[in-house]
Image (cartoon, rainbow, N blue to C red):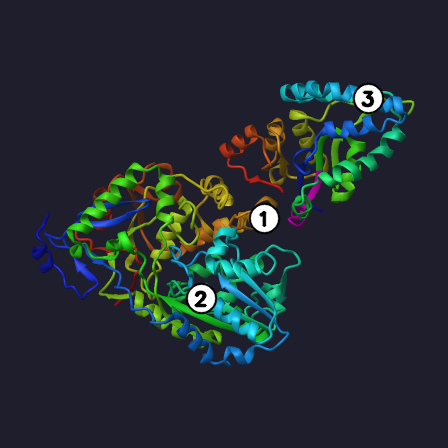
């Protein structure tokens, strides 16, 4: 074990960027449901998440202040009229990750809003989960999100999942100036007031996307969830660089023209790990002996568990996030404030791009809560989300190499991801070309009656969702020269995804250097917790 | 004009019943008191035999089973079919059956029921569900009386697949784009012949096949 005093010399405690030296400790890196502990080559730039911002001292007070002093709208109490029809639209289980410790901030907001509504004589209240084409949340998940009291009062008649395939459940508003269809959940569209309850996990969430995507349907979503829009987006996390954001903005402005929407947005810090796993958020240089022991014990235990059990264990640990800001009011000014808080938490400035970038892929994604991170989701985490965790300039150079750390197992959850299985095993062997996939197969999957049924009556993602996952990785795929998945346990999954594989990270770096040259620069995004880069 | 169809098995897939229920209903409605008693008793005694035969071979089961219709008049069978639909089939429909059929229609499919039951017993159900067509067994009638023999080929197992293939050729449908729905591994051929098979409330064997071939599995309620 290297002496702590030696380690201290090797990095600047204040900086989130550490250059690997000869005496640097090995890095603790997510590798699916377990971890790797790897020594990185000297000179590797390691980018760490910022420490968690301090939470607001009193969340309820912050919510009350926000709804009484909103941005660009009257206070909420002034908008509530006796006898009106009110619908609260709520972000679904895809945020935050992992789910936060209870009470979830959505519960806290709803408790305040519903009490205010009751005091104002508003009795016709529905709670609609903005799951768009995501899977329906289960009864247990819905209970956990809003708490026992609200659940018992509203479920199932007045607290339910949005159904984008209900033939009578959608209303078409006028198209945007770009001809984009705008469809909204009927109950929402026919409400006198809509309160949108948001959890802003990353800057991509919230704003016009909340209503424009969350309570919409395939006919509307296909105007921006397509390869062309994704290719035109340099980063999903930076509105100025995102065609996806601009399309949602046009759709959202149309919605705001026709409907009265009062947004309540909340920003969280990145305190993803608490209690016995809090060391995972530290720089390895800062690990104590106890931290090292805890890590080794955890790694050993996870390695001895069957994967499903390890997944269950990891999914059962909620994150002790703190609320760092609550903003309310009209869509754009509210979201602007949320974005500023979000960037303050996540953005780490870095000098220049790298030839080779390493992304450790954890066990979870927005689409696999209480489920399996299947190969398409590994792809979307690497080439979709992590690649886009920047403010317009990706961390990896054009034509560079991405190294993903994941076992890349061929496992799918038939209950949550039935159409993913067909997409992966029937379509990808034929083509990986997003344009061709969209043209030839997207509508077939979207309208497949079995997948529609599983989405509406079961807990399955919509039939078209695997296409969106594939498109999500499109600008990353277009940008990088090679993807290597290190530690992949089979050949066929990386091959179907168009990737190389190696047994170890060291081999992957060797291969990447063979591709980019011996002097190639290397960066590691030491995620999770969440971190975004601002490449100068 | 749709270029594809959704082929639905009926017993166990869209309704909770199977042909035994249908036959029992006919037995109970034979007409005379003696007829009812005799047929009900013989049906009750035959139930274990039906079970064994059904498990071993659906074709033999159907052939054996339809002999019990011998001697019944066509008019009577058709009349009883209407009552039988109301009393037996309609209450046994899964709540989500109509949703699934409607969704298939919205996706541009022609709706076709494929069943080993006799056509006249299924007509009221087909009408109720809004099916466009039906592939079913046909009873032979001589002089207005059922002979107890089914006009071959008997619609079951591999013959369901042949019938679907012939139907698609005749109607100009693309078999590859068609959907198939069944609950039983005995309908493996029917599911395998279409491009988009789905297991519905599958038995253990079909569930295992569906998992192996990555077919979607629906649990209709």
Label 1 to label 3: alpha-carbon separation: 41 Å
Residue positioned 32% across, 50% down in the render: A361
Residue B173 screen position, x and y as percent: 67, 39
Residue A220 screen position, x and y as percent: 56, 61
Name the chain under label 2.
A
Residue positioned 49% across, 67% down in the render: A110
Magenta span of residues: B103-112
Of the 4 image quadrants, the one containing the C terminus of chain A is bottom left
Same-chain status of marks 3 and 2: no
Q: Quadrant of residue A398?
A: bottom left
Same-chain status of marks 1 and 3: no
Q: Quadrant of residue A478?
A: bottom left
Along the polypeptide, which appears first: circle 1 or circle 2?
Answer: 2
Pointer 3 residue: B39
Q: Is residue A222 visible?
A: no
Residue B179 screen position, x and y as percent: 62, 39
Residue positioned 18% across, 50% down in the render: A290
Residue A330 screen position, x and y as percent: 49, 76
Name the chain under label 3.
B
């Amino acid at each position: 074990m290297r002496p702590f005093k030696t380690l201290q010399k090797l990095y600047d405690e204040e900086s989130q960027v550490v250059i690997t030296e000869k005496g640097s400790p090995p890095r603790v890196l997510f590798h699916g449901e377990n971890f790797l502990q790897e020594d990185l080559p000297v000179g590797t730039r390691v980018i760490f998440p910022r420490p968690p911002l301090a939470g607001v001292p009193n969340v309820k007070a912050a919510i009350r202040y926000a709804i009484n002093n909103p941005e660009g709208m009257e206070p909420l109490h002034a908008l509530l009229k006796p006898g009106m029809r009110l619908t609260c639209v709520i972000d679904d289980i895809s945020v935050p990750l992992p789910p936060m410790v209870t009470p979830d901030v959505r519960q806290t907001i709803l408790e305040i809003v519903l009490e205010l509504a009751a005091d104002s004589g508003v009795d016709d209240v529905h709670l609609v989960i903005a799951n768009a084409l995501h899977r329906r949340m289960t009864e247990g998940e819905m209970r956990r999100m809003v708490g026992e009291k609200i659940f018992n009062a509203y479920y199932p008649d007045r607290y339910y999942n949005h159904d984008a395939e209900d033939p009578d459940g959608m209303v078409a508003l006028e198209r945007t100036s770009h001809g984009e269809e705008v469809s909204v959940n009927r109950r929402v569209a026919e409400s006198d007031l809509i309160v949108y309850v948001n959890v802003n996990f990353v800057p991509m969430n919230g704003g016009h996307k909340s209503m424009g995507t969350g309570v919409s349907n395939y006919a509307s979503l296909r105007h921006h969830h397509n390869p062309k829009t994704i290719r035109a987006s340099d980063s999903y996390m930076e509105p100025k660089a995102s065609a996806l954001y601009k399309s949602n903005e046009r759709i959202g402005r149309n919605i705001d023209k026709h409907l009265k929407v009062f947004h309540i947005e909340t920003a969280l810090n990145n305190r993803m790990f608490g209690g016995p796993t809090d060391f995972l958020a530290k720089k390895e240089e800062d690990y104590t002996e106890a931290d090292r022991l805890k890590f080794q014990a955890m790694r050993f235990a996870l390695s001895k568990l069957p994967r499903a059990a390890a997944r269950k264990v990891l999914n059962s640990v909620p994150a002790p996030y703190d609320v760092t800001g609550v903003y309310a009011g009209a869509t754009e000014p509210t979201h602007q404030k949320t974005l500023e808080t979000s960037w303050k938490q996540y953005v780490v400035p870095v000098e220049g791009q790298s030839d080779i970038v390493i992304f450790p892929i954890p066990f979870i994604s927005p689409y696999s809560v209480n489920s399996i991170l299947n190969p398409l989701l590994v792809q979307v985490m690497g080439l979709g989300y992590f690649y886009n965790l920047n403010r317009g300039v990706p961390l990896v150079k054009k034509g560079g190499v991405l190294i993903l750390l994941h076992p890349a197992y061929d496992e799918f959850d038939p209950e949550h991801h039935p159409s993913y299985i067909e997409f992966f095993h029937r379509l990808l062997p034929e083509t990986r070309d997003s344009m061709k996939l969209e043209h030839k197969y997207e509508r077939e999957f979207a309208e497949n009656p079995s997948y529609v049924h599983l989405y509406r009556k079961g807990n399955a993602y919509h039939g078209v969702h695997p296409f969106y996952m594939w498109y999500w990785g499109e600008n990353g795929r277009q940008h990088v020269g090679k993807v290597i998945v290190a530690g992949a346990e089979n050949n066929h999954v990386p091959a179907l995804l168009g990737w190389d594989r190696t047994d170890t990270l060291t081999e992957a770096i060797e291969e990447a250097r063979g591709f980019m040259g011996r002097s190639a620069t290397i960066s590691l995004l030491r995620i999770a917790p969440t971190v975004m880069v601002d490449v100068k | 004009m749709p270029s594809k169809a959704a082929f639905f098995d009926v017993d166990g897939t869209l309704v909770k019943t199977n042909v035994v229920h249908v036959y029992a209903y006919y037995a109970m409605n034979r007409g005379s008191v003696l007829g009812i008693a005799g047929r009900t008793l013989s049906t009750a005694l035959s139930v274990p035999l039906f079970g064994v035969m059904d498990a071993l071979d659906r074709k033999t089961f159907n052939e054996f089973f339809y002999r019990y219709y011998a001697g019944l008049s066509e008019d009577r069978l058709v009349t009883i079919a209407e009552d039988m639909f109301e009393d037996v089939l309609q209450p046994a429909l899964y709540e989500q059956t109509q949703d699934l059929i409607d969704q298939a229609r919205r996706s541009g499919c022609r709706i076709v029921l494929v069943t080993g039951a006799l056509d006249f017993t299924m007509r009221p159900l087909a009408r109720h569900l809004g099916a466009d067509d039906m592939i079913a067994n046909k009873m032979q009638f001589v002089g207005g009386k059922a002979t107890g023999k089914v006009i071959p080929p008997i619609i079951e197992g591999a013959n369901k697949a042949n019938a679907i293939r012939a139907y698609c050729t005749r109607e100009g449908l693309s078999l590859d784009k068609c959907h198939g729905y069944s609950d039983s591994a005995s309908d493996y051929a029917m599911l395998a012949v279409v491009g988009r098979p789905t297991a519905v409330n599958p038995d253990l064997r079909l569930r295992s096949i569906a998992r192996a071939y990555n077919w979607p599995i629906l649990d209709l309620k």
